[in-house]
């Protein structure tokens, strides 16, 4: 086999491994995560459905996104006065287990009172900025891109403001770039639209 062909085959095999779907978490993995996630319940809710608008829902989030955010808090790529110290003692397995637990939970619809006119403007802005290219249709998320459908309104507003202000930068520049194009009204309308999604 030629060196060039070997390189091409190796690259193809590596790409296939990276793109292969992860095996679903077993009931045992989810139970391990439930136990490890108990300290999280005070803010995120026992089932990952937060009751505070400033705290994100984790229920039904992609496990990979939760894992990456915990890792970023632990390693200082993302900072929060509560989450950063909570993540420091977590092992890789702890983070995977917690992420799998919350990903397996059912997200509840937001109780935030949305405004139909703002939702309409938010959808138009989402279409204009091609949000679904990364967050997918219905804003269901994928891999390291979060599910944002039904997320807490105040949390979405704050994250978009943080990306715009470049105080949150653990996004490889994608959200930071998009947020630069948004006005405060755009941010509020987008958050209304995202929160309204089921």
Image: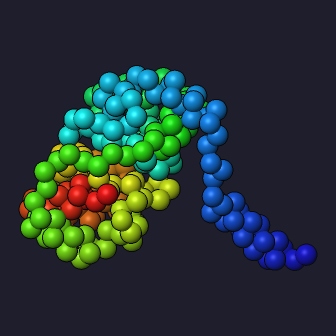
Q: Quadrant of residue 147?
A: bottom left
Q: Nearer the viewer, residue 170 or 117?
A: 117
Residue 165 seen in the figure = no
Q: Is residue 188 left or right of residue 30?
A: left
How was this image coloured?
rainbow
Q: Nearer the viewer, residue 136 or 197?
A: 197
Q: Is residue 173 left or right of residue 68?
A: left
Please name the residue shown 38% across and 69% down the image. Answer: 137
Task: Please tell me whether residue 174 is drawn above or below residue 146 in the rendered image.
Answer: below
Please name the residue shown 33% across and 38% down the image. Answer: 49
Q: Image quadrant for the C terminus?
A: bottom left
Give percent across and percent down for residue 14: 70, 62
Q: Nearer the viewer, residue 71 or 128?
A: 128
Give percent across and percent down for residue 32: 58, 28
Give percent across and percent down for residue 109: 29, 49
Q: Image quadrant for the N terminus?
A: bottom right
Number of numbered labels in the structure image? 0
Please name the residue shown 39% across and 54% down the image. Answer: 146
Q: Nearer the viewer, residue 4 or 171?
A: 171
Task: Please tell me whether residue 2 is drawn above or below residue 110 in the rendered image.
Answer: below
Please name the residue shown 36% across and 62% down the image. Answer: 139
Task: Please tell me whether residue 116 is drawn above or below residue 159 in the rendered image.
Answer: below
Give percent across and percent down for residue 7: 77, 71
Q: Quadrant of residue 138?
A: bottom left
Residue 192 seen in the figure = yes
């Amino acid at each position: 086999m030629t060196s060039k062909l070997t390189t091409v085959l190796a690259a193809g095999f590596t790409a296939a491994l990276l793109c292969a779907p992860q095996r679903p978490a077993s009931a045992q993995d989810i139970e391990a995560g439930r136990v490890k996630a108990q300290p999280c319940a005070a803010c995120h809710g026992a089932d990952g459905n937060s009751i505070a608008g400033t705290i994100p829902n984790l229920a039904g989030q992609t496990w990979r996104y939760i894992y990456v955010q915990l890792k970023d808090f632990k390693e200082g790529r993302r900072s929060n006065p509560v989450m950063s110290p909570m993540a420091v003692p977590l092992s890789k397995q702890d983070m995977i287990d917690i992420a799998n637990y919350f990903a397996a939970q059912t997200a509840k619809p937001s109780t935030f009172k949305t405004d139909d006119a703002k939702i309409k403007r938010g959808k138009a802005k989402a279409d204009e900025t091609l949000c679904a290219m990364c967050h997918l249709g219905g804003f269901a998320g994928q891999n390291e891109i979060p599910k944002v459908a039904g997320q807490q309104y105040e949390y979405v507003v704050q994250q978009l403001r943080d990306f715009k202000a470049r105080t949150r930068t653990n996004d490889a520049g994608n959200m930071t770039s998009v947020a630069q194009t948004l006005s405060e009204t755009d941010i509020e309308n987008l958050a209304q639209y995202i929160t309204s999604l089921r």
